[in-house]
Structures are given as structure tokens and as C-alpha cells.
Image (cartoon, rainbow, N blue to C red):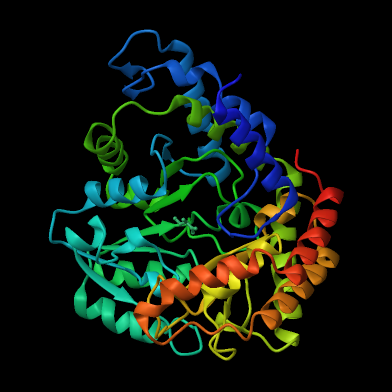
Amino acid sequence: MSDKVFELVKKEKKRQENTLAMIPSENYASKAVREAVGSVLMNKYAEGYPGKRYYQGNKIIDEIENLAIERAKKIFKVPHVNVQPYSGSPANSEVLFALCNTGDTVMGMKLSAGGHLTHGHDITFSGKYFKSVQFGLDEKGFLNYKQITAQAKLEKPKVMLIGTTAYPLALDWKFFGEIADSIGAWLVADISHVVGLIIAGVYPSPFPYAHIVTTTTHKTLRGPRGAMILVTKKGVKKDPDLPTKIDKAVFPGMQGGPHENAIAGIAVCLNEASKTSFKAYGKQVVKNAKALASTLQSSGLTLVGGGTESHLLVIDLRPEKLSGNVVAEALEIAGIIVNKNSVPNDHMPPIYPSGVRLGTPAITTRGMKEKEMKQIAGWILKVIEHVEIYKLPENIKARGTFMKAYKDKISKDKFLLDIAKEVQSLCKKFPLK
Ligand code: DSN
């Protein structure tokens, strides 16, 4: 394997080993999952569904896809599952394609409040081809359920596509189910971020209240890049044809040949997620997030929503008058990988937001616990204090030049590089598998 790509893969492996992956949507898939995804299954075309393919030679592929479906049905106790979506955004687009006509009203949480692009953001298909109605958070970072009720009753969306990517608190699925029922809307729950926590029983489950649930498989589920669309008992009761509508929307509606190697990886990760050890993992993810949050807060940092009830937290850097870009770049030099993120009612644009988002799924997979969270929080606090002098210019045009010079400067910053060495020592104690 002399291709330059493999040198780069080795480098990336090292980077993953020596740094703390704290982007809440990332995780480490097991060797078994990686083997399935990298297997010969990628050689096969299989348009259609098990038993109804458009190509020959799919007997074994059918067994694999059926295994993934059966495992998902068992874990989530649902009557119908489609495991073919290429990822989360296609899964959500397929659901909207199945349920709506162009111009129908779709309701979701604003991206800036912690929702997702595909939940009706104006620059995406979900905001362009449908009438998008969006709700946000109050100043303190909480959902205002009373306001959402009034908005839903007024706008009468056909679909409520609800889920979070940067909202640290638990959602009240019962509320969303009741409001959807009261206006005859479909409730689609996007649980991509929290699926592993739901399996572990440490985050509320939408399954009794939603008609459809979508999830990616590579976040807290620790599987391959992919997604599933799950039709609940409530969904089938509302429309017995819903499973067929979903399957048709996935193929041929939006996709061609399914990635059977990824589907095999999904089957493997679902088997792993059915074990008792996975429940312990999910519980520890939340314990770790809470430990991280309380240490950061007790040192005076402001967290969106006042803390966390999940796997993630968002630090609001407005009190420090700091940009998320400045902090995220410095943390990277220190070996702590997070992402810049908008905070509720951010006065800054998404490219220069006022917060950073961090999460515990990946570092918990490594085996880290509360003790390590305190140590990591200590490093984060030191880094933030260290870069407090670097203020993003008010002048929009000056920002690019400022960030370039800043990145150059901190890449040689001894204080940050020393932390990176300490981070590396911690990482060595928790090797990747
Ligand atoms: N990109 C994912 C995340 O980071 O939350 C959402 O699609």
C-alpha cells in the first residue's frame, strides 16, 4: 500500500490517538464496524429491497440488510425500519419527500438554537421547497413550550421535524407528540445526536409519541456513517401505508444503490448497542458531560441552558467578549478538538459565532470518566484565560486577516503546546481500540 493516501491515513490515526475528540457528533467506531465497512460488500449493487432487487447476486446482501433491519426493530421496538439512507440529511429529506408536497408547511427548531440544517433552515432544500416555520430559544437558552404551541396552532405545519444538534437539555417529546396530534401534524423525531443515550435510558425516548424517527448511526450509536428511518407503531396506526411511502421515498425517490457495506456496519453496531456494556457507556457519557459542565461553571463560565442533560454543552463566550473561532483554534493547538458554535440569539454570524460546542461521546468510548473530565475542564479554562486578550475585530473585513495572524501566532505558543503534551499523556492512558 504505497499510495500517499495511506501515509495520510496513518497521520490521521495518530492525530485521533493523540488528541481529545470533543465534537459531540463524533465517536470511534469499533474494529468490527470498520471491518464491515471496509469489506467486499462495497463491490455490490443492490437497488431495491431484500427479496425485491433489480440486480442478481444479492442473496447474501439480502441476509445482511435483513439482519440490520431486524436488529433495529428489536432495539427500538418498531414495526418498520429502512437502513438505506446514506446519512442524516438524506434521511430527513426522504421523510419530507414521503410526507409533503412542495410548499407544505414544515416546523422545526432554528439551527442557531441548536436544531439542524434539514429541519427547515432557509438555505437548504427543507427551507426552500417547503414553507418553513422555525422556533428558537429564550435569552437563557430554554425552549418556550407555550410559544411553540401558539406558533404550531397558528401555522398548522404538516410535519414537525424536531431534533437537536447543539441544544444541551432534554426535549419534552410528550409535548411535541400532543401538539402534533392536536393539529393533525406528523411528528418526526430526529434523534441522531442522542440515540445512544436513548438506548441507555438516560435521555427521553420519542418512540411512544413520534410517527417517524430518524437517526444517524455514527454519533452516540458508534456505528458507520449512515442513517435509519424508523416508523413507529403510532405512525403505522395513523397511516398503514407509511412504511411503503418511506421505502419508496428512499429508493427510487431520492437514492440509488444502497451502501451495503455501511448497512453491514449498522448491523454490527446495533449488535454492540444491544449489550449491557453499551447501556453503561451511554450512562457514563451523560455523567461525564455533567462533570465537565459543573467544573466549567464553577469557574465562572456561562453554559447555554445552564448546563447539560445530555452528551453536549455549549459555552457562551459573550461574557468573556471572546469569539468561538478564537477559542476553538486555541483548543486545537492544545490538543482539544471542539467546534465553534452559535449561541441563542447570537449577535454574530455563524461563521464567527460566540460559542463553542463540546461533547463527551468519543472520550467516554476511550474509557475516560469524571476524574479525567475535571482535568480536561481545567485545560479548557486555562486555554480560554490564555487567549482572552485576542478580540475579534468589529470590522467585518478585518476579521480574516486577524484570524490568519492569530492562527499563525498560536501555532507556536508554548503555553498551548505544553498543554498539548499533557493531553497526549492522558490520551496514551486511554488508547483507541
Ligand atoms: N454535523 C452534525 C453535527 O455536528 O451535529 C449534524 O449533522
For the point 40% across and 74% down, the residue is 112
For the point 26% across and 64% down, the residue is 185
Given residues 110 and 377, the one toward you in this image is: 377
Where is 219 relative to 349, above or below?
Answer: above
Q: Position of residue 35 (x, y in %)?
A: 62, 26
Q: Position of residue 336 (x, y in %)?
A: 68, 62
Given residues 196 and 72, the one toward you in this image is: 196
Q: Is residue 278 left or right of residue 23?
A: right
**Residue 62 visible in image:** no
For the point 55% across and 45% down, the residue is 218
Q: Is residue 64 left or right of residue 96?
A: right
Where is 368 relative to 397, above or below?
Answer: above
| Quadrant placement of the C terminus | top right
Given residues 137 and 74, the one toward you in this image is: 137
Q: Position of residue 394 (x, y in %)?
A: 41, 87
**Which quadrant would residue 267 be assigned to in this image?**
top right
Q: Is residue 283 left or right of residue 139?
A: right
The residue positioned farthest toward the top in the image shown: 57
Where is 186 relative to 396, above or below?
Answer: above
Q: How many marks?
A: 0
**Residue 292 visible in image:** yes
For the point 24% across and 46% down, the residue is 98
Given residues 280 and 187, the one toward you in this image is: 280
Q: Position of residue 219 (x, y in %)?
A: 56, 50
| Quadrant placement of the N terminus | top right
